[in-house]
Amino acid sequence: MEQTVEEKLKALFELQTLHTLIDKIRQTRGELPMEVADLEDEVAGLETRIQKIKAELDELEDSIVTRKNMIKEALAATKKYEVQLGDVKNNREYDAISKEIEIQGLEVQVSEKKIKEHTFDIQNKTEVYEKALAIITERKKDLEIKKAELDTITAETEKEEASIIHKADDAEKIIEERLLIAYNRLRDNAKNGLAVVTIQRDSCSGCFNQIPPQRQLDIRQRKRIIVCEHCGRIIVDEGFALEEVPGV
């Protein structure tokens, strides 16, 4: 059996009433869900940054060890060449060995320079690393506090919210698809989530613009679905607000 216009309006108003209750419950959580999500993103970003700095520090430490080993090898080679100098038989051999000693000396100088550079980089990166560790420790504390607050509020309201969501789902089933699509579009576009509003003080309670007397009369007759000329919301008469919404 097809619904009358009044029944359609009543179903829409009941759905709006349930959705408004859900909105109010979620508003009690305020900005906490967003704050928790932002802190989680920040902590994840800091963890990635810390891991990257740690890897860079490890790489620098490995480079210093490598350079120190190169210095040891160069010094050992220099000693070997210096011994060989005593056994040279001609100037060409002398020059060749002297050249090798010079090369090893340059190798030592380059390695010592690199060690100084790496040591300087390690000092700077260690400061950044320690600051990042301090920041992430604070952010994790903040996250724990915010999560605890959110969990407390959610625990207090989730049962009630789940119950109302279930009722809203049931309420949607008796509304024809065309009307439900229009309702959801209006609700999505409205800042306060109101798609269905009542007449209040001769005005639309959604945008507070005046409703002409004849249009008010048409709304109260409940014979057709009427929308606000200004905001596009579906308007029902104030009598709906006096009627008890099932399950609320």
Image: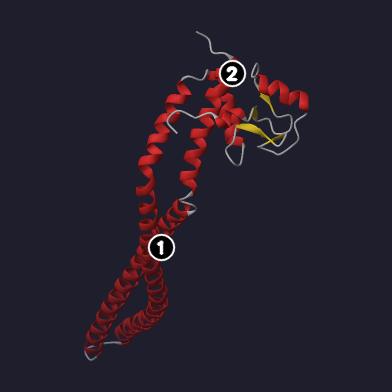
Is residue 246 toward the left or the right of residue 9 in the image?
left
Q: What element carries label 2?
A: helix
> Looking at numbered disc 1 in the image, what kind of residue is underneath it?
Leu
Is residue 197 toward the left or the right of residue 134 in the image?
right
The residue identified by callout 1 is 46
Q: How far apart, in angstroms, are the residues tagged by discs 1 and 2?
A: 57 Å
- First along the sequence among labels 1 and 2: 2
The relative height of residue 122 versus residue 219 in the rendered view (above or below) is below
Residue 211 sits in quarter: top right
Residue 210 sits in quarter: top right
Number of the label disc, if any, that sits on residue 6: 2
Residue 230 sits in quarter: top right
Q: Nearer the viewer, residue 33 or 123?
A: 33
Provide residue 132's location: percent of width, then percent of height: 40, 70
Is residue 196 toward the left or the right of residue 144 in the image?
right
User: Image point 47% across, 24% down: which residue?
Assistant: 172
